[in-house]
Amino acid sequence: MRTVIQRVKNARVDIPDTGYSSFIGKGLLVLAAFVDEDTEADLEWTARKIAALRIFDDENGVMNLSVKDTGGEILVVSQFTLYASTVKGNRPSYIRAAKPDVAVPLYEKFCMKVDAELGRTAGRGVFGADMKVSLLNDGPVTIIIDSKIKE
């Protein structure tokens, strides 16, 4: 599992022509991608790590607080392109990314694990939809986490 976490002042995902929208204020936008080999342990480890990341400023301006500590929100959006391979040519290959029959259940389980870690429901995108994501990056602070290398 691979995620890109962005500390945000706000973020939203919209699906044009459907009326679907999800908005968060201060917190984290999490872009998440999955591979066939991902396990429950990958989902749990990543959700726990994201909720505990100390990337929000404390009263001294030091990044020492987590999203849970600040009462912030999380928006989770699926993004298979995080597994793009650009080794050959200029057209990325997405062969490593899990296909929907594997990725959808992983995404849904991951969102539930994020909810549990956060202590409330996180915002969500819609798997496979043509989503429009907007954010106001705070810092900017952007972190990449890969569950396979535990980094």
Image (cartoon, rainbow, N blue to C red):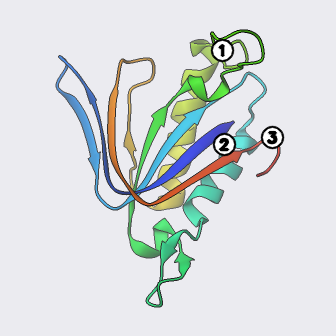
Q: In percent of the image, x 24 and y 34: which residue is there?
A: 21
Q: In percent of the image, x 71 and y 25: which residue is there?
A: 35
Nearest the eye: 4 or 42: 4
Mark sitting on residue 148: 3
Residue type pointed to by label 3: Lys
**Marks 1 and 3, how far apart in space?**
17 Å
* Secondary structure beneath label 3: loop
Nearest the eye: 108 or 75: 75
Residue type pointed to by label 1: Tyr
Direction from residue 16 to residue 1 in the image, left or right: right
Q: Earlier in the sequence, mark 1 or mark 3?
A: 1
> Closer to us: mark 2 or mark 1?
1
Q: Earlier in the sequence, mark 2 or mark 1?
A: 2
Q: How busy is the neighbourhood of tag 2: few (under 14 within 10 Å), some, or many (20 plus)?
A: many
Question: In which image quadrant can residue 87 be found?
Answer: top right
Q: In percent of the image, x 71 and y 19: which residue is there?
A: 86
Where's residue 68, x and y in %?
A: 47, 69
Q: Quadrant of the N terminus?
A: top right
The answer to whether the residues at label 1 and label 3 have Cβ atoms under 8 Å apart is no
> Closer to us: mark 3 or mark 2?
3
The answer to whether the residues at label 3 and label 2 have Cβ atoms under 8 Å apart is no
Direction from residue 23 to residue 119 in the image, left or right: right
Direction from residue 51 to residue 126 in the image, left or right: left
* Secondary structure beneath label 1: loop
Mark sitting on residue 43: 2
Q: In percent of the image, x 57 and y 40: which residue is there?
A: 110
Where's residue 26, x and y in %?
A: 34, 62
Q: How busy is the neighbourhood of tag 1: few (under 14 within 10 Å), some, or many (20 plus)?
A: some
Residue type pointed to by label 2: Leu
**Marks 2 and 1, how far apart in space?**
21 Å
Where's residue 107, x and y in %?
A: 55, 31
Mark sitting on residue 94: 1
